């Protein structure tokens, strides 16, 4: 909804067209795909609709600049700061600068508010404190004890990706590149020679005894060989998952490029697929060293970025065309999606069952778990949930770092047990029909 603010007096010689242009630039810096053509259309639309009511002005610009539901909050916050709030610059500075906590309860910034503030400030300098006495500034250094305060990095670890400003998003991406995703080797039936093995190797023992005239001095032993599993990532790039998908793919890019090094040497291979309305293999793009270039190339190939969602159809394509190629040797599947599917739940459940039977483990990462009291109300979520081994959140750096626990602990189920229990008890909220999408 449009934010409510008292009407402001309009200047007699105002430059409305120039202000609309500046407003469009702020929206573009905040992440909305706005070009010169849409700016000209907005100016012509405002001229045709008139400026008698500011509510009409809001919705005219909204119709020209907003194409997707996830862009509404960014537009509303930017509009409020740019047009409606008489003291919008002070409000933006309060969002961008650290403040001292007082006795009032601290309120979190609304979705996209910090991103809108950063787009409008665009490098503006913070206000300097006034010196009403006219005295020279004191050069005495001020010492602040920050031993009991949280660092900016710790704050970014738990911050929702959707709440981050542009600068915070870049810092979070750098943190994601340092995360490790270790994996334990898998035992096989094949046996190899090992001095500390538990099984005797009689053939090698008899062969060695021939060198000493048939006398057996030691008994050779062997143990089961180990192999490293593959990592298969299926990432939802629909409109509701756009911001989270970019961050998760940065993390996957870092894992793929550290393959064979340090703690990540265990992954036999890293395969990545995106899906929205169709399935796209972006594995070769993630092999590029530069993360931005890799994701840009992947975005050019995945034409359904920020489109609709057909999870069941895309999983059917994966099971038919790619499962036998990439799911061998006990692959671990990371499924990144909110589970809001527009297809038939029965088809989605069948394809999820096939996926689980082909994989060693299926770990579902869902950013909707960031909400307290989340329940599986959507039909797609209820169809997918029984066929995953672990159900975890994926909305922050800390939640992605916790994936190491899910991989190292075979018994980890995350939030699956709680949600399955809520589903068994009919956990849909009162007034919401079962199967209705949240």
Image: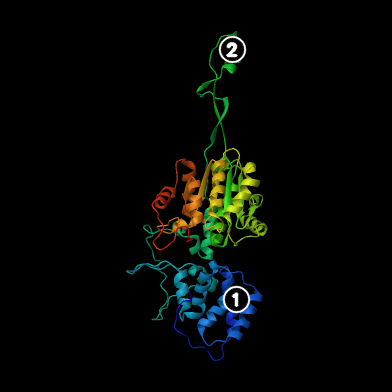
Q: Regarding mark 2 in the picture, which secondary structure is present there?
A: helix
Labels 2 and 1 touching (C-beta < 8 A): no
Which is closer to the viewer, label 2 or label 1?
Answer: 1
Seen from the viewer's position, the closer of residues 99 and 374 is 374
Residue positioned most to the left = 103
Q: What crowding class fits label 1: few (fewer than 14 Cα within 10 Å), some (14-19), or many (20 or more)?
A: some
Seen from the viewer's position, the closer of residues 258 and 357 is 357
Residue positioned most to the bottom = 12
- Picture disc at residue 77: none
Residue wearing tag 1: 64
Seen from the viewer's position, the closer of residues 341 and 50 is 341
Q: What crowding class fits label 2: few (fewer than 14 Cα within 10 Å), some (14-19), or many (20 or more)?
A: some
Residue positioned most to the top = 213
Do we see residue 298 in this rendering? Answer: yes
Image x and y of residue 328, in percent: 61, 39
Identity of the residue drawn at 55% across and 48% down: 350
Residue wearing tag 2: 209
Do we see residue 123 in this rendering? Answer: no
Image x and y of residue 430, in percent: 39, 61
Identity of the residue drawn at 39% across and 81% down: 132
User: Quick check: 120 above or below 239?
Assistant: below
Image x and y of residue 181, in percent: 52, 46
User: Quick check: 405 above or below 118?
Assistant: above
Mark 2–mark 1 distance (CA, rounded to whole Å): 87 Å
């Amino acid at each position: 909804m449009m934010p409510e603010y008292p009407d402001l007096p309009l200047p007699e010689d105002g430059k409305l067209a120039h202000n609309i242009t500046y407003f469009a630039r702020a929206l573009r810096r905040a992440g909305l795909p706005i070009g010169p053509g849409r700016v000209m259309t907005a100016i012509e639309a405002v001229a045709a609709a008139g400026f008698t009511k500011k509510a009409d002005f809001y919705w005219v610009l909204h119709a020209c600049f907003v194409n997707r539901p996830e862009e509404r909050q960014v537009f509303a916050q930017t509009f409020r700061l740019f047009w409606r709030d008489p003291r919008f610059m002070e409000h933006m500075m309060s969002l961008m600068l650290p403040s001292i906590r007082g006795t009032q309860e601290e309120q979190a910034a609304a979705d996209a508010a910090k991103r809108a503030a950063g787009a409008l400030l665009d490098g503006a300098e913070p206000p300097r404190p006034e010196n009403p006495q006219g005295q020279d500034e004191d050069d005495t250094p001020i010492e602040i004890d920050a031993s009991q305060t949280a660092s900016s990095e710790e704050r970014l670890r738990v911050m929702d990706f959707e709440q981050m400003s542009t600068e915070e998003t870049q810092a979070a991406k750098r943190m994601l590149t340092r995360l490790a995703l270790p994996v334990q080797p898998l035992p096989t039936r094949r046996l190899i020679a090992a001095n500390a093995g538990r099984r005797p190797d009689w053939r090698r023992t008899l062969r060695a005894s021939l060198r000493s005239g048939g006398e057996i001095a030691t008994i050779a032993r062997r143990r089961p060989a180990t192999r490293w599993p593959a990592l298969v990532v299926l990432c939802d790039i629909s409109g509701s998952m756009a911001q989270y998908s970019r961050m998760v793919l940065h993390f996957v890019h870092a894992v793929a490029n550290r393959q064979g090094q340090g703690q990540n040497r265990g992954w036999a291979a890293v395969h990545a697929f995106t899906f929205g309305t169709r399935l796209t293999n972006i594995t070769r793009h993630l092999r590029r060293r530069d993360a931005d270039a890799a994701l840009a190339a992947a975005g050019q190939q995945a034409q359904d970025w920020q489109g609709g969602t057909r999870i069941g159809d895309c999983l059917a394509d994966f099971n038919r065309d790619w499962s036998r190629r990439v799911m061998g040797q006990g692959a671990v599947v990371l499924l990144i999606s909110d589970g809001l599917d527009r297809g038939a739940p029965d088809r989605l459940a069948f394809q999820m069952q096939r996926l689980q039977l082909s994989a060693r483990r299926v770990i579902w990462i869902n950013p909707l778990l960031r909400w307290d009291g989340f329940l599986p109300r959507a039909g797609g979520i209820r169809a997918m949930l029984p066929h995953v081994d672990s159900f975890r959140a994926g909305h922050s750096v800390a939640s992605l770092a916790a994936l190491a626990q899910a991989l190292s602990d075979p018994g980890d189920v995350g939030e699956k047990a709680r949600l399955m229990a809520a589903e068994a008890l009919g956990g849909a909220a009162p007034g919401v029909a079962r199967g209705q999408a949240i």
